[in-house]
Amino acid sequence: MSSETKPLRIFVWAHPRSRSTALEFSVNTLPNVKAFHELYCLAYHNGEERPVALDKALPVTGVGLQFRQVKETLEKDYPGNDVIFCKDIAYSLDRDFDRLPKGFQHTFLIRDPRKSIVSWWKACLKEGLKYEDWILEEGGIKHVYDLFKYVTEDLGQPPVILDADELANHPEDTLRAWCPRVGLEFNPGMLHWEAANVSHWLEFHQTAFYRDTFFGQALTSTGFTPTVESDIDWTKVPEFVKGRIRDAVPYYEKMYKLRITKQ
């Protein structure tokens, strides 16, 4: 990177259960990276400005991030860092794109909703959460698509999309194709990281009651894990979940066609 481009600012937007935390850990292995984990998601679920319809916010003492504070935090200068890297969940913007921080290259991570939504449903059941309250329309995938359309059409940025299963199964090839698109130089160290290296997470994320259920596999990982295809017993999947999947597939397929493929 030239001095004129420092610090490089990269934002990865994803939907739940898209393996985005693994990508976060990968990028965080690079030197001089200032990483942020899901600040918008925290504001969306727990901040003072959370949506009125979100009546099941997670109560957290001492945490009241506002969207304005998140934006200001991400736009700050961080001397000594070459890369400002953020990972978040697209639905947390609540489609208010004025909340986006300035100066970032936006990139998107998607995963087949037949996998991601079922995974989210199973995680909710395991945690004792009512999945009807947590699985958004289209499983959060249309939120990614709407943001993608804004970034490419209104901000004029080129489409930069990764598919989660391709990243998991072919991490080196996929990262080698992705890194130049966002201004990074691929480093083989991106393929391996220390387990549970979450020192850059806010204390809330480190101690959240759902941490092990929703982030457990990522926290124990030390690298990308190839996809293990498992048969889903669709007779046990509720119609509510199937409907979310049907609604999500068209948006996933539109973005999948534009994804970065391995070199």
Image (cartoon, rainbow, N blue to C red):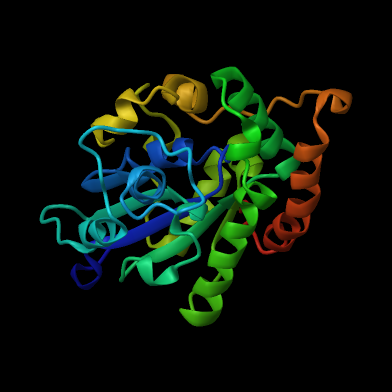
Q: Residue at x 70, y 25 (%)?
A: 228
138 left or right, relative to 14: right
Q: Is residue 53 visible?
A: yes
User: Which quarter of the image is occupied by the C terminus?
Assistant: bottom right
Q: Is residue 222 visible?
A: no
Residue 32 in picture, x, y percent from top left: 21, 47
221 left or right, relative to 1: right
| Up-down relation of residue 190 to residue 235 (above or below) | below
User: Which quarter of the image is occupied by the N terminus?
Assistant: bottom left
Q: Residue at x 45, y 54 (%)?
A: 51
| Up-down relation of residue 248 to residue 17 (above or below) | below
Residue 189 in picture, x, y percent from top left: 37, 35
The number of callouts visible is 0
Residue 24 in picture, x, y percent from top left: 40, 41
Q: Residue at x 74, y 46 (%)?
A: 244
13 left or right, relative to 4: right
State the image quarter where residue 102 is shown. Answer: bottom left
Name the foreground residue: 191 vs 53: 53
17 left or right, relative to 12: right
Name the foreground residue: 17 vs 23: 17
Residue 171 in picture, x, y percent from top left: 55, 39
Q: Residue furthest right?
A: 235
State the image quarter where residue 231 is shown. Answer: top right
| Up-down relation of residue 183 to residue 237 (above or below) | below
